[in-house]
């Protein structure tokens, strides 16, 4: 059996890093897998961010219906499955942190700084991401903003690091090792850990596996009317206003005529069904049967222009997502409803009673609940 020599830079620390797994080949395989995972999370994270905060030059389509559900599920569940990869990679390469001298040249100093940025940024993304899906905001900054900008730093540092290490990776991966058994077991263990995390999480988005979703913050089928709830009416401070018999829905703005409708008035309009999911940024999603008034029909009654944008306002008086906006492509879609019923019965208060927005291919935070005003822009 041939053993790879311990790098000369580590010989000053005898006996500390003798495992064969602290070698370039293991690090290379883990690095390639980690790179694919991180770039996948980066791409799906951009989809999530730009769906929630669309730039002026882009309008997201309403179809396919489940696009956001799939991309956000991949982002969160795949991100969780990447945690064993990251930890294994750090364990494999951590002896390099003890190299002496720590900096041998200006170029070496830049490389070490880049690695510090990459490792620090990756740990920040994973730790805050896990805290976010657990609804534990133990940090003083806004998660979405910090997560978004740090993602660019990590992706950029990763690409530069991969380019710098590519020749080494190519050499070590293409060389057939003589003592691969231990490495193979280690890599399979890491892959198995990621698979287990996926298995006990994916049920939050894939209902047939909901029973296995022991790590999921929300499970399909759990909650009022068989649908999970992120924010209750009590938490939003709207319970009294939503139950008020004097509630009215107002349609105003750039319309030919303002509309004011009671709940009975809304129910008197043609009602339509839609099978649509609630898909949340934390990765969970669940399909449901909705019934209500098509938004395009309501706006047609008010005389809204075909190219108008619509601001949907909740009874909530504060919060980042008390309002949301709909582009023409979304409000013209026949599946976009002001829903009055859910899974065969009137909306539960926590699901947005007396009426809520439900639209295809849209993040859950933008499916505004407790709607009381539509403003045509």
Image (cartoon, helix red, strand yellow):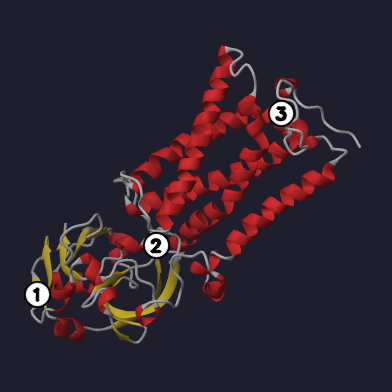
- Taking the image as shown, residue 330 lies to the left or right of residue 27, namely left
Q: Residue furthest top?
A: 105
Quadrant for the N terminus in the image: top right
Task: Name the spot of residue 200 as percent of width and height, x first.
Answer: 57, 65
Mark 2 or 1, which is nearer the eye?
A: 2
N-term mark: 2 or 3 = 3
Q: Which residue is mark 2?
A: 280
Q: How many marks?
A: 3
Q: Is residue 230 above or below residue 13?
A: below
N-term mark: 1 or 3 = 3
Badge 1, how many Cα within 10 Å: few under 14, some, many 20+?
some
Q: Is residue 62 above or below residue 12?
A: below
N-term mark: 2 or 1 = 1
Q: Secondary structure at mark 1?
A: strand
45, 137: nearer the viewer = 137
Which residue is at a point 76% across and 30% down the rendered structure image?
A: 171
Residue 149 shows in the view: yes
- Taking the image as shown, residue 61 lies to the left or right of residue 373, namely right
Q: Quadrant of residue 57?
A: top left
Residue 338 shows in the view: no
Task: Name the spot of residue 362 as percent of width and height, x first.
Answer: 36, 62
Q: Which residue is mark 1?
A: 260
Q: Which residue is mark 3?
A: 168
Spatial distance from mark 1 to mark 3, Cα to Cα?
69 Å
Task: Name the spot of residue 119 as percent of width and height, x first.
Answer: 53, 35
Which residue is at a point 40% across and 73% down the rendered structure image?
A: 276
Spatial distance from mark 2 to mark 3, Cα to Cα?
41 Å
Task: Name the spot of residue 88 as percent of width and height, x first.
Answer: 64, 44
């Amino acid at each position: 059996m041939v053993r790879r020599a311990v790098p000369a830079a580590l010989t000053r620390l005898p006996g500390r890093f003798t495992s064969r797994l602290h070698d370039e080949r293991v690090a290379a395989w883990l690095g390639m897998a980690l790179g694919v995972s991180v770039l996948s999370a980066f791409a799906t994270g951009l989809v999530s961010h730009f769906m929630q905060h669309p730039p002026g030059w882009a309008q997201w389509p309403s179809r396919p219906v489940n696009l956001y559900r799939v991309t956000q599920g991949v982002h969160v569940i795949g991100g969780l499955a990447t945690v064993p990869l990251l930890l294994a990679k750090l364990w494999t390469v951590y002896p390099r942190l003890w190299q002496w001298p720590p900096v041998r040249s200006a170029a070496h100093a830049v490389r070490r700084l880049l690695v510090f940025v990459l490792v620090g940024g990756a740990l920040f993304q994973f730790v805050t991401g896990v805290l976010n899906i657990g609804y534990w905001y133990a940090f003083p900054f806004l998660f979405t903003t910090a997560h978004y900008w740090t993602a660019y730093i990590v992706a950029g540092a990763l690409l530069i690091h991969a380019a710098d290490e590519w020749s080494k990776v190519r050499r070590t991966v293409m060389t057939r090792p003589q003592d691969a058994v231990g490495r193979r077991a280690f890599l399979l263990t890491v892959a198995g850990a990621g698979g287990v995390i996926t298995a006990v999480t994916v049920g939050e988005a894939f209902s047939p596996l909901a029973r296995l979703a022991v790590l999921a913050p929300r499970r399909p089928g759990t909650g009022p009317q068989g649908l999970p709830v992120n924010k209750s009416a009590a938490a939003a401070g709207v319970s009294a206003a939503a139950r008020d018999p004097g509630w009215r829905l107002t349609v105003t703005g750039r319309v030919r005529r303002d509309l004011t409708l009671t709940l009975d008035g809304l129910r008197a309009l043609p009602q339509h069904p839609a099978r649509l999911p609630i898909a949340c940024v934390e990765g969970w999603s669940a399909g449901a049967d909705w019934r209500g008034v098509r938004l395009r029909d309501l706006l047609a009654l008010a005389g809204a222009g075909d190219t108008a944008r619509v601001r949907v306002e909740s009874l909530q008086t504060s919060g980042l997502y008390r309002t949301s906006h709909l582009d023409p492509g979304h409000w013209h879609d026949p599946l976009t409803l002001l829903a009055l019923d859910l899974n065969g019965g009137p909306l539960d208060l926590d699901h947005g009673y007396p009426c809520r927005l439900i639209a295809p291919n849209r993040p859950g935070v933008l499916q505004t609940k407790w709607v009381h005003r539509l403003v045509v822009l």
